[in-house]
Image (cartoon, coloured by chain):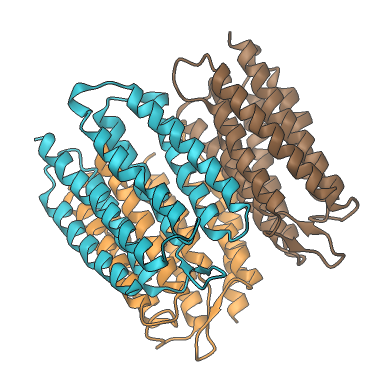
Chain colours: A orange, B brown, C cyan
Amino acid sequence: MLNFAFFAGLLIFAISSAYFYFSSKNEDGFNTAFLVSFITLISYVLMWQGNLTVVTSTGEPIFWTRWLFYGLSCTLLMLEITQLKKIEGGAQVQLLYLTAIVMATGFLAARDLTAIRWVHFVISSIAYVLLVMKILSVKTAAADWIHGYIFFGWTVFPIVFLLAPTGLGLIGATMANLLYLLLDIYTKIIFNIQLGRKSV
Amino acid sequence: MLNFAFFAGLLIFAISSAYFYFSSKNEDGFNTAFLVSFITLISYVLMWQGNLTVVTSTGEPIFWTRWLFYGLSCTLLMLEITQLKKIEGGAQVQLLYLTAIVMATGFLAARDLTAIRWVHFVISSIAYVLLVMKILSVKTAAADWIHGYIFFGWTVFPIVFLLAPTGLGLIGATMANLLYLLLDIYTKIIFNIQLGRKSV
Amino acid sequence: MLNFAFFAGLLIFAISSAYFYFSSKNEDGFNTAFLVSFITLISYVLMWQGNLTVVTSTGEPIFWTRWLFYGLSCTLLMLEITQLKKIEGGAQVQLLYLTAIVMATGFLAARDLTAIRWVHFVISSIAYVLLVMKILSVKTAAADWIHGYIFFGWTVFPIVFLLAPTGLGLIGATMANLLYLLLDIYTKIIFNIQLGRKSV
């Protein structure tokens, strides 16, 4: 069952990579939707392979590589969000740095099985709150539809992290990885399809 | 003999680093030829040191650090190629991302001894084909001499990868590393000397 | 006592992160002083946690993660220095690359317990000398106060590296980490406070 989520993710993101590559109407040549899917595809291959994990005391595997790949794919998503919100220059670079810090400290929290992982989790959460506050504070009527993606997509990731073996262990690794797959589809594929439609 | 290729590489790239540093006529201050050689020098020191390898079932060592350093040096080479071809903006950033993805998945394929390494190899190859197609599609009369470097330099790397212990194992680690050394000299030193002459 | 330096660092950089975040008068939105402190905070949490070390033959632990975080924080400091010195374009990018190379080879030298670490140390030192020579060669009357920070701050790092268990082992890990803490406070907090005052 664990493998099912990873194999499904592998197939879905292989298809979405091809879709975004061939459907791009972007004149600029920087196809972020494709790159986000392609990087996520690599991440799912690595989790499907399955040997880069730490195992908790209750025997649940934690796939910590996930967070390293989010460091790459989510900075690209943040680039799309800031372009949509017309956040430019230094403020944009700041948001890209904060996104990378959220994911890098998420990686540290995921790899660590001791109580100190909560310190990493708190630091990651602080960076995330600073990031969300900044995005919500910029009002751009045409781009406010993305707030839904932030609230129901991005913010559910740390909640799953908290419930999963990485945090309190209230749900198992299989359930956690299925939830992450749904979130990945929502924030990386559906978001980019909607982004493509809005920008026509 | 293994050590010979690495020690020779170390000496050659130390000399080319010094050469490109002192011979630079670049007014801009960004000396990519020097940085490519200097990063490759560090890569050869690490392989000469020799403790960061995985060993195949037939006892051949694989020096996977090589591909991490290519991630840095080849994005710099790609920057030179795109500047020469006048590929700018989003299309340029896309090519830098694809180059980094080719090398990062090459690293994953090199580290992995199971059959799943072929999945990484296929993904790396797809990224490489997308990259080459893009470069060849941009016609710039003055820059078409670089096509030879792409075909006889860059494209031979995955062929060596395929023949070496990382792939089918038809040649040994010693031969593979000698071939990589020749390719490194061709694509990172001879290319940059020719680039310097053309731009005078 | 080892833990003391790390816990003190953790507290100090948590406070300085908050201070630089709330005191910023930067209109641009890119708060480098905050990011430098925040990244250093994460580095101190990881060293306080204490399980990512190599141990020398005399039983002294080396906290090699430090140098990876310097790779991030010191490129941000270098960005501040180049902006102050009005070094732009290619020359600025070159200095950011050199800074990252100094820290990455410092990481390789710190992780390695064999004699080959001296090769990494020499390469790191060459990159550092090239970097310092470039900065000192650009005369900008209003920015020459930073030369003191380079000489008494940055240049003391490799001296501590040389005296510490990473080098000759003339001082122990506890003393080395206390000295690094003082240097971190000087180059990352006091420097940024002074930078804030000068730019009013």
In the image, residue A142 sits, relative to residue B33, either above or below, namely below
Using the image as rendered, state which of residue C17 and residue B22 is in the foreground.
B22
Residue B189 place in picture, x, y as percent: 68, 27
Single out the residue that lies furthest toward the front.
C170
> Hey, which residue is sitting farthest top in the picture?
B200
Identity of the residue furthest to the left in this view = C200
Would you say residue B98 is visible in this rendering?
no
Q: For the point 40% across and 48% down, which residue is it?
A: C159
Query: Height in image: B35 above or below C107?
Result: above
Residue visible at 62% across and 31% down in the picture: B134
Whether residue B52 is visible, yes or no, is yes
Residue C179: x and y, percent?
32, 58
- Is A153 left or right of C67, judged from the image as shown? left
- Using the image as rendered, state which of residue B155 and residue A85 is in the foreground: B155
Q: In which quarter of the image is residue C26?
A: top left
What number of labels is visible? 0
Instruction: Decide which of C16, B85 is in the foreground and name it.
Output: C16
Direction bottom: furthest residue: A58
Asked which quadrant contains residue A93, the reply is top left
Out of C90 and C117, give the one closest to the viewer.
C117
Q: Report x, y in % for residue A87.
A: 25, 41
Residue at 64% in and 73% down:
A51
**Left or right of A116 in this view: B151:** right
Q: Position of residue B16 (x, y in %)?
A: 65, 27
Tell me: residue A122, above or below residue C165. Answer: below
Residue B181 location, quadrant: top right
